[in-house]
Image (tube, coloured by chain):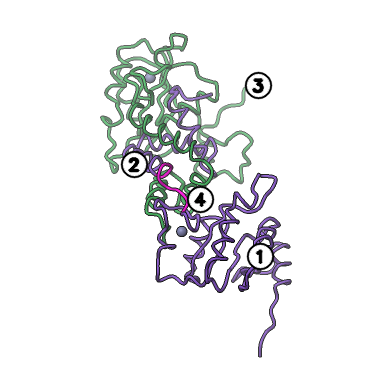
Chain colours: A purple, B green
Amino acid sequence: MKNDSDLLNELINALTILPGVGIKSAQRMAFNILEKNRDKAKNLSDLLRLATEQIRNCNQCRNLTEQSICNICSDEKRDSNMLCIVENPSDVLAIENSGTFKGKYFVLMGRLSPIDGLGPDELGIPKLIEQITNSNIKEIIVATSPTVEGDATSFYIRDQIKREVKVTRIAYGVPMGGELEYVDNTTLGRAIQGRREIKE
Amino acid sequence: MKNDSDLLNELINALTILPGVGIKSAQRMAFNILEKNRDKAKNLSDLLRLATEQIRNCNQCRNLTEQSICNICSDEKRDSNMLCIVENPSDVLAIENSGTFKGKYFVLMGRLSPIDGLGPDELGIPKLIEQITNSNIKEIIVATSPTVEGDATSFYIRDQIKREVKVTRIAYGVPMGGELEYVDNTTLGRAIQGRREIKE
Ligand SMILES: [Zn+2]
Ligand SMILES: [Zn+2]
């Protein structure tokens, strides 16, 4: 059974494109907008249009930006000796939030996944390798996800880099404050493989 | 710490107007839209604009519609002897989904709540009473919520109806299949108050 208003039903369906939004949440959102939030919904409509039209990938690092070169790439205060390779824009945000990295980024916009048609070209890897070759980058941190595909991506990139440069992978293991019994097996396996000597 | 793109940050903020969407979900939504769903997001933008501009309240029942009189009000097959009074459009949808009512509706768009500035006028109660007075409605089902305010609204409406007509309130109690130990006290209280004799 649907609402009496076709436009309302269309709006509800359209809201389900948002991740984590099923038909019930979409209904609640649509009613809420129409009963209380029309002005803000108009603003959201405008921003959705603007964002889909204007936000593109940075010509240098592929991160999301409305400029041709993003602010991080064009920021001369950032350390261009360090490059961190991540899968997604949300990873850049997470690393920036951690406050532990002041170099530049390269955003693959995915990870190698032949089954999804994601090969080196789709991830911009030739461009990345070219950038590395023509730069004075001293350390490359590969921060792809701790998954089979993320690992494969990291090995592939390592293999393509032909010049002398330090390539590291971020550490994966038990999260800080995590109790071992609640950590999944794969993470625990990673933590054990990645063990480090306790220095005196 | 924010994203590098101002437009992206504005979009994320705008998404938090949706009920149940915090900043983290909004980020996930924005990234998902921009990485995978631009066409659908454009469509959502269009529908948000159209819906906020065109969906209004039905002149007769106040339910959401893009017409002056909604389809339920203008449907001659529906029983105009029965009127069901609800708080919100979502209640109409829920009752329609139950398939148990074939009459007409009146949607208050809220319930009496002086503290929120919601009095009889804001809920269209004078208009509702006029409709009842000038109609041949035989039964009025008051389906306002089982809350203090929903009860007050139902008593107020009952009190305003000056002509002879059967006025009922839907039953509130333990949901079907619900185990008593998981039912909250208020609901259980309602269920006991609303007990019915078991006929032989
Ligand atoms: Zn960039
Ligand atoms: Zn109507």
Q: Which residue is mark 4?
A: B28
Is B51 located above or below residue A47 in the figure? Answer: above
Mark 2: few/some/many CA within 10 Å (<14, 14-19, 20+): many
Is A147 located above or below residue B26 in the figure? Answer: below
* Amino acid type of the residue tagged 2 in the rendering: Asn
Q: Which residue is mark 3?
A: B200
- Quadrant the C terminus of chain A occupies: bottom right
| Marks 2 and 1 in Cβ contact (< 8 Å) | no
Per the rendered image, the range of residues in magenta is A51-58
- State the image coordinates of residue A13 (x, y, percent, origin top left): 50, 32
Pointer 4 or 3: first along the chain: 4
Q: Which mark is residue B66?
A: none
What is the chain identity of the residue bearing mark 4? B
- Measure the C-alpha gap from mark 2 to mark 3: 61 Å
Residue nearest the viewer, comparing B19 with B129: B19
- Measure the C-alpha gap from mark 2 to mark 1: 45 Å
Mark 4: few/some/many CA within 10 Å (<14, 14-19, 20+): some
Q: Which mark is residue A43?
A: 2
- Measure the C-alpha gap from mark 4 to mark 2: 19 Å
Tell which tag, 4 or 1, sits nearer the viewer.
Answer: 1
Label 2 secondary element: helix
Tell which tag, 1 or 3, sits nearer the viewer.
Answer: 1
